[in-house]
Amino acid sequence: MEYSCTAYELKCNECGKRYGNRPLSGCPDCLAPLEIAYDLDSARGEFTREAIEAGPANIWRYKRLLPIPDGFQPDLPVGFTPLVRAKRLGKRIGASNLYIKNDAVCFPTLSFKDRVVSVALANAQKFGFTTVGCSSTGNLANSVAAQAARLGIKASILVPADLEPAKILNTLVYGARLIRIDGNYDHVNRLCTLIADEYNWGLVNVNLRPYYAEGSKTVGFEIAEQLGWRLPDNVVVPMAGGSLIRKIRKAFKELIYLGLVEDKPVKFFGAQATGCSPIAVAVREGADNFIPQKPNTIARSLAIGNPADGPAAAKMIIADGGWAEDVSDVELVSGIQELAETEGIFTETAGGVTTAVTARLYAQGRIHPDETTVVCITGNGLKTTDALAGRYEVARAIRPRLADFDAYLKELDGVSEPEPELVAAGDVRVL
Amino acid sequence: MSFKVMLPTAFTRHTEGQKQFASTAPNLTGLLTEIDSTFPALGTQIKDDEGKLRRFINVYVNDEDIRFLGGEGYAFQDGDEVMLIPSIAGGC
Ligand SMILES: [Zn+2]
């Protein structure tokens, strides 16, 4: 099925000016970030539940409300990750209607960044960039490297020097050029704005940012569709720059506008690590601006001390009656373990933050146990295994003999008692 | 006392292409006043209707955000490198 996308162009959030379609991140007049505006009314009757459900089982089913240039043929099946009921985690934290949106398994590089990068690179090709890149705390680097490799575009990626080794390897393996910067993400990001000025590179989160950020909407579209075309009561979202939480809301608003879901209030809850929590602090103080911080947390993918989308994210959370919390590194590690032990989902440090914040929100009574709540897990734990260093003892090896095994279990449990047989011999029937 | 102010390309349409200039302003407020008289169009772009620096502008002194140095209270030092750049969103 081929159809063209809904007409879209860059628009300034602050002053309302429109700029067509080109690689541009900020309003040349008032310098505010630009966003994509759609001719939503023309999508009415086209972007329907039926049309979406007939599409592929990936983000391209929502192509009509993504900024995808005409003629682009998506061939990477990104997204449409599982939305799973989290009964065991729910029981532990006092939630009876809890869901996990599990982007720890997003294709191809195991984080939600695969969504944004696939939209960004479609536009990079259209704008004619032969080199793409990004500033990244790791997940974005992995995704840009992988998807650029598949498209045959050169990639130059800038990261803080102290990134997790797995995230570095996950970038290099795709043949990307990895440039390590002696500084934190905010330093790297600032350098990238200067590079975008001087080099003709398509930097996905700088000059391609408005297009890139729209890819995040697919998380919101999927949540609504997977809940049977209805919106949840609450969404808990990790915040680094504060973009994802706003885009999930944008997705919900678009669905409401087009009549695909019933209008209802949804509260948004932001999660940050205490070592880098400018947006959470702003929300708690009721401020619509934030004070930048110098990040100091093992949740490096959330370690953006000077988030440009921060004021907008804080304002939105407050306006909708939501809240934001931050948790310590110790709590986030427990969050990783709790999610893994209860739901079989191994998330990275950011997901530990999100899980721990969710538990706190229930404990505080900010989320009612019966409300439908979706927790967004955005990245895979295999990339940040260092966070769990020293947490688990690896047992000594034993010889492949039953006697050794018996002795070993006795040593572990104190008693050695076989589990009761599941089926009595007499009950076994030949069918 | 003199220090260098550097501007990204996006601002140079208001400075006749100049990417840097020298200043002797004592602090940020003084620098903004100086910009108003030297490059009035740039002054208009980087400030809001109330004359305050727009929140989408970041000011760095020797790679450090000026807000970490006391913001408007910071006294520029001889040889400082001051950079004015629009903030760019990143991360999730
Ligand atoms: Zn504007």
Image (spheres, coloured by chain):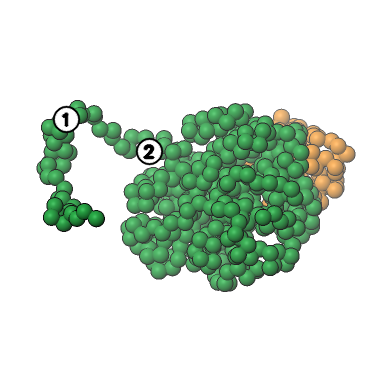
Image spot of residue A249 (x, y percent): 59, 61
Image spot of residue A96 (x, y percent): 37, 65
Q: Residue under circle 1? A: A401
Chain A painted colour: green
Foreground residue among B17 and A18: A18
Q: Residue at x 15, y 33 (%)?
A: A402
Foreground residue among B41 and A147: A147
| Residue B3, image quadrant | top right
Q: Which subunit holds the residue at mark 2? A: A
Question: In screen coordinates, is A287 left or right of B79?
Answer: left
Judge: label 2 CB < 8 Å from ligand 1. Answer: no
Specify the label residue A158 is tagged with: none
Q: Is disc 2 placed on a helix, strand or loop?
A: helix
1 and 2 marks on the same chain: yes
Marks 2 and 1: in contact by CB < 8 Å?
no
Q: Residue at x 68, y 33 (%)?
A: A153
From this view, report whether residue A306 is shown above or below residue A145.
below
Q: Residue at x 83, y 40 (%)?
A: B12
* Residue type marked 1: Arg
Q: Residue under circle 2? A: A388
* Lower sequence index among marks 1 and 2: 2
